[in-house]
Amino acid sequence: MAVLQLFSKRKQRAEGRVSDVYIYDQVPNSLRVQIIHIWRDTFGEGGGYMSPTSAAWHIVHRALAREFGVFRLGDVHDDDFEAIANYFLKVQDVARALDIVEVVFEAAQGFARGQNYYHANAKISPDAAARELNERFAEHAVGYSFINGQIIQKDTEVLHQSIVLPVLTLLHEKEFSGANEEYLSAHEHYRHGKYKECLNDCLKSFESTMKTICKQKRWSVDPNATSAKLVETCLKNDLIPAYLLAEIGALRSVLEAGIPTVRNRLGAHGQGATPIVVPSHYASYVLNLTGATISFLVASAEA
C-alpha cells in the first residue's frame, strides 16, 4: 500500500519541521503500529487455525521465542500473530525490536516463495512491504533500513544513498556473495556496537572483493594472500590505469593502508593488559571507506 502524503506531513515539510537527524535509540509507538499493519498486509489475514497465514506466524513465533530464550512472547491466550505483535509493541530494547522486524520481514520473503502464498489473502508483496518499511523508517527519522534481508544502520542519508546502497547492489551478484555477506555482517556488528568485529569483517569483505576480481580476471593469486598482496596484484594487472593513479595520487596508499591499518591497529591483534576501545566514529569511517573502495574496485573491473 502506498504511503499517503497527508496534509499534516506536507505542512511539516513546508515549515521545515522534518528532522534530517536520525534517531537510533527508540522506535516510536506509531511506527511500530504502522509496521504491524504492513505485516498484516504482507501475510494476509484470517483463514482459521493452521491456515497458510497462521502456519507462517506459528513458525515465526517459535523461531523468535527460541532465539530470545522464552517459551512464548505474549499472553497464553494470544494467537501467534498477536503474541509477536503485542511483544513488539511493548519491548523497550531497540535492538530486540529491530530483531523482530528483521526476522518477520525476512520470513515474508520465504513465505512468498511458498506454494501456499497465493491462498493467504495477502494484499502486498514482500518487496513492496520492504519499500514501505524503509519509507516509514525515513518518515520517523529512525536511522535504519531493511536491505537484502537485513536491518542496516544509516549514519546519514547522503552516505547511505551514495555508498551503502550502491555497494550492496554491486555485491548482490552471485560471484561476490562472500564479500556481500561479510559487508552485511560488518553492518550488523556496527548496529550492535561490536566495533572490533565490524572492522574485521570490513577487511574480510575488502579482501574477498579483490579475490573475486582476481578470479574473474584469471590473475594468479595465493588463496591466503593478504590485502597488500591482493592490492599489488590488482595494480600490477592494470585494474586501475596508471594515468588514473597519477591523477588521484594517494590511491595506492589508501587501498593498501586505509582499511587494513585501521583494522589491524584497533581490531585484529591481542589488546594486552589495557582493553582497546574502538570508537563508533572509527567503525563508521571504515564501513564507508570499505564501501567506497569496493565500489571503485568493482566498477574498475567492469570498465
Image: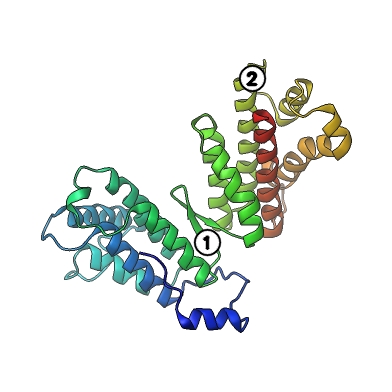
Instruction: Look at the picture and state if 117 lies above or below 222.
Output: below
Dot 1: what SS? strand
The residue indicated by pointer 2 is 217
Q: x, y (%) of residue 129? A: 37, 58
Count all numbered tags in the image, as a single digit.
2
**Is 109 displayed left or right of 161 in the figure?**
left
Instruction: Look at the picture and state if 170 lies above or below 194.
Output: above
Q: Viewer-proximal residue, 252 or 240?
A: 240
> What is the quadrant of the C terminus in the image?
top right
Q: Is residue 17 visible?
A: no
Instruction: Look at the picture and state if 247 lies above or below 155.
Output: above
- What residue sits 51% from the left and 38% below the top? 172
The residue indicated by pointer 1 is 144
Q: x, y (%) of residue 186? A: 58, 47
Q: Earlier in the sequence, mark 2 or mark 1?
A: 1
| Image colouring | rainbow
**Is 253 displayed left or right of 179 in the figure?**
right
**Is 139 displayed left or right of 54 in the figure?**
right
- What residue sits 23% from the left and 60% below the top? 44
Q: Which amino acid type is shown beneath numbered disc 1? A: Tyr
Quadrant of the rendered image containing residue 96: bottom left
- What residue sits 22% from the left and 62% below the top? 80
Q: Is residue 166 visible?
A: yes
- What residue sits 34% from the left and 48% below the top? 109
**Residues packed near mark 1 inside 10 Å, few (<14), some (14 to 19) or many (20 plus):** many
Q: x, y (%) of residue 215? A: 60, 21
Dot 2: what SS? helix
